[in-house]
Image (tube, rainbow, N blue to C red):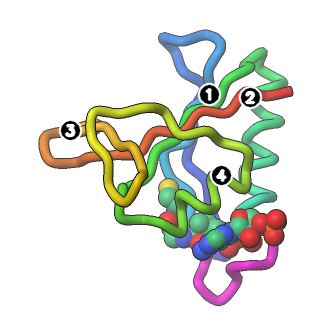
């Protein structure tokens, strides 16, 4: 497998899609595959009437923060900060802190 994205259309927030995780095989990174996966997910969200996409990553994952910024995401203010990056404590479960991203679809 070269890459994958796991996301869904929010059942509780009818304007939103949520991307929980994406990964590209290390041998295939830097070739636009991550961008392509996100663009397909954005398109699926648009086709289903979603205008906002949210995503998250670990505060230590600086590469993912840079990637998401390149993909047009903004960082959501949190209740913590690491190297200038805001994050939300206990986002998924106790001890699992996350940086949250949001992107409006044009
Ligand atoms: C993050 C990840 C999905 C990026 O996939 P990729 O296929 O290498 O990304 P792309 O080649 O499509 O890059 C898209 C843009 O993001 C930027 N980018 C990608 N990786 C980057 C990095 N490590 N540092 C800075 N910028 C980066 C690229 O410069 C590119 O911008 P450009 O199109 O203007 O040149 C991949 O590195 C990965 O699988 N990482 C491990 C898993 C992970 O952290 N997933 C995200 C958390 S859910």
Residue drawn 74% across and 20% down? 51
**Which image quadrant for residue 79?**
top left
Q: Position of residue 69 (x, y in %)?
A: 65, 52
Mark 4 to mark 3 CA distance (whole Å): 22 Å
Mark closest to the chain's N terminus, 3 or 2: 2
Q: Secondary structure at mark 2?
A: helix
Whether disc 4's CB lies below 8 Å from ligand 1 is answered yes
Mark 1 to mark 2 CA distance (whole Å): 6 Å
Q: Is 26 a magenta residue?
A: yes
Q: Which residue does the numbered mark 2 point to in the structure image?
A: 45
Camera-near label (3 vs 1) is 3
Camera-near label (2 vs 4) is 4
Whether label 3 touches label 1, CB < 8 Å: no
The numbered disc on residue 69 is: 4
Mark closest to the chain's N terminus, 4 or 3: 4
Residue drawn 14% across and 47% down? 95
Camera-near label (4 vs 3) is 4
Mark 3 to mark 1 CA distance (whole Å): 21 Å
Give the extent of the magenta segment. Answer: 24-33
Q: Which residue does the numbered mark 1 point to in the structure image?
A: 17
Mark closest to the chain's N terminus, 2 or 4: 2
**Which image quadrant for residue 17?**
top right
Q: Residue furthest bottom?
A: 27
- Report the front residue among 7 and 34: 34
Mark 2 to mark 4 CA distance (whole Å): 19 Å
Question: Considering only vertical position in the picture, is 42 above or below 4?
Answer: above
Q: Secondary structure at mark 1?
A: strand
Which quadrant of the render holds ligand 1? Answer: bottom right
């Amino acid at each position: 497998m070269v890459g994958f994205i796991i996301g869904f259309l929010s059942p509780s927030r009818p304007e939103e899609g949520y991307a929980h995780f994406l990964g590209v095989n290390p041998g295939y990174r830097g070739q636009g595959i991550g961008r392509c996966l996100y663009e397909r997910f954005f398109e699926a969200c648009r086709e289903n009437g979603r205008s906002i996409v949210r995503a998250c990553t670990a505060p230590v994952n600086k590469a993912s923060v840079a990637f998401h910024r390149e993909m047009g995401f903004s960082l959501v203010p949190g209740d913590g900060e690491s190297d200038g990056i805001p994050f939300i404590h206990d986002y998924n479960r106790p001890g699992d802190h996350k940086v949250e991203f949001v992107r409006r679809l044009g």
